[in-house]
Structure formats: C-alpha cells, structure tokens
Amino acid sequence: MLTDTIVAVATPNGRGGVGIVRLSGPKAMQVASKVVRVELSNSRITNYTDFLDSKGDKIDTGLVVFFKGPNSYTGENVIEMHMHGNPIILGEMVRACCELDARLARPGEFTERAFRAGKINLVQAEAVADLIAAQSVKAVRSAQNTLEGHFGNVVEKLILQTQEIRYQLEAAIDFSDDVSSPDFIPHMFGLHKKLLEGLKSLLASATQGAKLSEGFKLVIAGPPNAGKSMLLNRLVQSERAIVSSEAGTTRDAINVECRLRDIPVQIIDTAGLREDVESSIEKEGIKRTYAAIEKADLVIYLKDVTSTVPAGRDYESDLVTHAKILTVFNKLDKLPETNKLEKNSGIYISALSGVGVANLEDAIIENFDASNNENVEFSARERHLIALKKAINAIDAIEDVSFGASPELVAEDYREATGALQEIGGEYSTEDLLGDIFSKFCIGK
Ligand SMILES: Nc1nc2c(ncn2[C@@H]2O[C@H](COP(=O)(O)OP(=O)(O)OP(=O)(O)O)[C@@H](O)[C@H]2O)c(=O)[nH]1
Ligand SMILES: [Mg+2]
C-alpha cells in the first residue's frame, strides 16, 4: 500500500561517522515531529536536534532534513535523520518510528515509490540499483548516464519513430489513394530502414552496457584433471575451488565474480567432461557444465598439454554455444624446455606456476570485445536486450513492397514493436516484473 509511511536505515549496515534513517509517506511529518525537537516546516533546511524514542527519551543528537513532497526522492514528504553511525542507535530510531505510525520499508521501496509517482521510469529505477552495485568507474559512469535518462531518451525517440510510421501507414490505409502513390513505398521504407538502424545500434550499445553491469560470463570447461579449478583459483587469486589429482573433483559449477583488468567477469569452473560416468552427482555436474557453456560469453576449453592419449572423446568440437571457444593448453611446466610449442596454435599456460596466464587474460579481454567498454554510453540489463530484440524481430522481415501490398499487417508488426519498446520504460509493466526488479534492491533505497 502506497499510503503507508515507511522507514528504513539508508546507510550500509555497520559503523561509521554518520548513519541515516529515512522516513517517507503521508504521515512522515507526524511521526518525525515526535522523534525530533525542531519544527519541520522549511523544506531542505538542515536543523540540529535531539532524537527521541517513542516515549520521548533521548536516543542521540544529529541533523534532520525535511523534503516536502513532491520535491523529494519518492515524491512524498521525506524526512532524513542524520545520526551517529551506530547500528544500535539507528535501530532504535527505526523502532521508534514503527511504534509511532510507520512500518519498515521493503527492499527498494523508496525507489519504487519514485517510479510509481512518475519521478523516474523503470530504466532509471534499475540504474539506481546498478549505480549502487557498480564495480568499476566505468560502470558507475554508465549507470549515472542511464539514471540521467540517456538510455531512456533513445528508447523514447525510437518509440516515437515507431508510432509515427504506424500513424502514417494507418492514415494511408484510410485514404487508399496514398498507398498506391509512387512515392509512398520508398518514403515509408526509408523511415523503416532508419528506425531499424536505430534499434540495432541501440541494441549493440545496450549489450555492452549490460555486460558492464552484469559481467561477462567466462566458462572454464574441458576434460577432468586438466587443471580447470587451479586456473579459476589463479585467475581470481584465491583458493575458491578444490584442486585434486582425482579426476572428477568438481561437481557443481562454481561461480566466482571478479574483475579482470577492471572488467567485471563471472568465472564459472565446471565439472570435467567425460563419458562413462558412474556417479549420478557427476552426471548432474556434467549436465550443468553444458548448461553453463550455452549461456557463456566466452568458453576456455582447457586441456592437459602432456596428455598424449586423449581421455575418451574430445568434446570441444561439439560444444553447443554462441560463445567463442578459446583452446588453452595447461601444465606447460611439465614439458621439457626443448619442446617447441610456439609453432602450434593455441594458448599455453601453467596454472601452477602462472606462466602464460597474463597472455591468457589478454586473450580473454580481447575476446570479450571489452575494448568497446571504453565508450559504453549507459548501463542496461538483460531485460532491455530482450525487449529490443523483440522490437527488432517484429519488424525486421518487413520488405519494401509489404508497405503497398499488406499495409494492415505491417501496421500490426509496428504495433508489436511499439509494445516491446514500451516495456523497457515500464509504461505497461506487470506487478510481477516490478516485484522482481525492486526486490533485488537493498533496504533503505
Ligand atoms: N604440474 C602442473 N599440475 C597442474 C597444473 N594445473 C593443475 N595441475 C594439477 O592437476 C590436477 C588436477 O587439477 P584440478 O584443477 O583439480 O583439475 P580440474 O580440471 O578442475 O579437474 P576436475 O574438477 O576433476 O574436472 C591437480 O593435481 C593439480 O595440482 C599445472 O599447471 N601444472
Ligand atoms: Mg575441478
């Protein structure tokens, strides 16, 4: 219920110089008037005050700021209490507000209220979460751009273009002379091509933006005992996975988020691929390996350079994935120095000694095409990519003659494209989608 008044600690859990409790809703003023000792009539003015609990006993001293709705983050009356950054003090204040007339906010509820009040669209709400979660300066900048509306504005322009084509088409259908005029088809097809170009270019930059906020998926696959887990540990510089000479050590896929050369990457170590597996756990592990490979942005297929007899089948050639596969030979340290490997193609490393791993990192970054990240314009999410692809698919197959031959069908395709684009900004979003997006926020945001 949006008529509730909500309260939460807005600063991270832990101790610090300042901790902030935030109140928002129709009764925010009423609740605050009982827990501070100053008048809260002037918006955006800071006042020094004692903070009190619900019985009037002093909890702390600090600063209070009143933001009069609609000129506040949520659009409602908002009160921020800047207290000493101790979770006990902040907890006492939250409890006091709840004993008066507020309730504890759900994750993301302040931002959800900003969205519902029309202060920001859904893309901007998501950008708030991405901004808080951003792991690099580039990710911060791109989330800020999205928050400022850069991404949403491009989507908005494309929606207008899509609607414009549909309106012109519908008008022409109503006056059928227009459809048969010689200029009609080239004119409409010109607009169509321009729109498609715009959609595809937005998809390309949004894809880079999504990678920057959600991270590239790098899957390490290969036969058992190739050293996949040791390579994972080497790349993330911590002993995350068990390494052992027993074949079939890794069962479940191990997912580690890290940064390679300042780029967020999810590295996924997987169960070794082999046939004739007895254990049902390992079988399930191998199933998960294939599932991870399917979703990968890049696959490292790791082999033991010393294994002359390939253990069973070589699976590399039948991996099903859109991703590029990098063949990497491990355990270079075990080869005699005289062995001239450079003549063969592939990347040679020793996960044990670290030799060649820097080269491998270069190759990984190059293959992510992360250099494009230099110019990432804005943050984006998987959900936006799906909607953009839906819009493109709706109109991609339209040919120039279709505008004259079946204008009604073309108009319908355009209607579908518009709907898909409108999903991005959340104009017609479902409660499920909103629940899904805001539940991933932290409390207090
Ligand atoms: N000499 C040498 N040994 C290595 C190297 N990398 C891994 N090993 C050894 O190879 C064995 C297997 O390593 P793991 O990392 O567990 O191999 P894995 O590919 O994860 O194996 P599974 O999880 O069973 O599929 C261990 O005994 C490691 O110590 C390397 O670069 N050089
Ligand atoms: Mg392993």
Image (spheres, grey):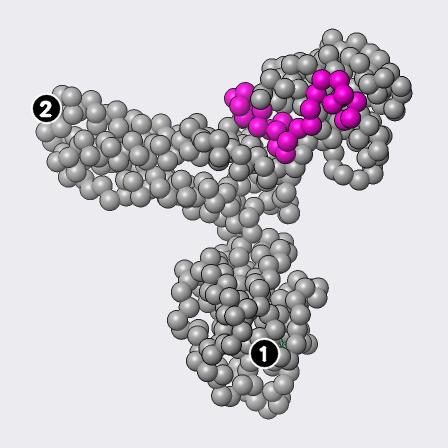
Q: Quadrant of residue 427?
A: top left
Near-viewer residue (52 or 157): 52
422 versus 209 height, above or below: above
Q: Is residue 264 left or right of residue 308?
A: right
Residue in the foreground of this view, choosing between 145 and 101: 101
Task: Tell which circle, 2 or 1, labels the residue nearer the N-terminal end.
Answer: 2
Residue 285: give its label.
none
Residue 282, placed above or below residue 44: below
Q: Quadrant of the C terminus?
A: top right
Label 2 – label 1 distance at C-alpha: 75 Å
Q: Amino acid at mark 1?
A: Ala
Question: Does residue 95 show up magenta in the picture?
Answer: yes
Local crowd size for mark 1, using a 10 Å CA cut-off: few (<14), some (14–19), many (≥20): some
Q: Mark 2 belongs to which amino acid?
A: Asp
- In the figure, is residue 384 to the left or right of 64? left
Q: Secondary structure at mark 1?
A: loop
Quadrant position of the N terminus in the picture: top right
Give whichever of 25, 231 is nearer the camera. 25
Task: Classify residue 105 as left or right of residue 196.
Answer: right
**Whether residue 377 is visible:** no
Res 177 label? 2
Magenta-drawn stretch contains 219? no
> What percent of the width, then of the height, locates residue 85?
83, 33
Q: Identify the residue shown where x is 64% and y is 71%.
A: 230
Depth check, mark 2 against mark 1: the one in front is 1
Q: Position of residue 7 (x, y in %)?
A: 70, 25
Q: What residue span does the magenta drawing correspond to?
A: 94-120
Q: Quadrant of ligand 1?
A: bottom right
**Residue depicted at 29% across the width and 31% down the height:** 415
Q: Which mark is residue 247?
A: 1
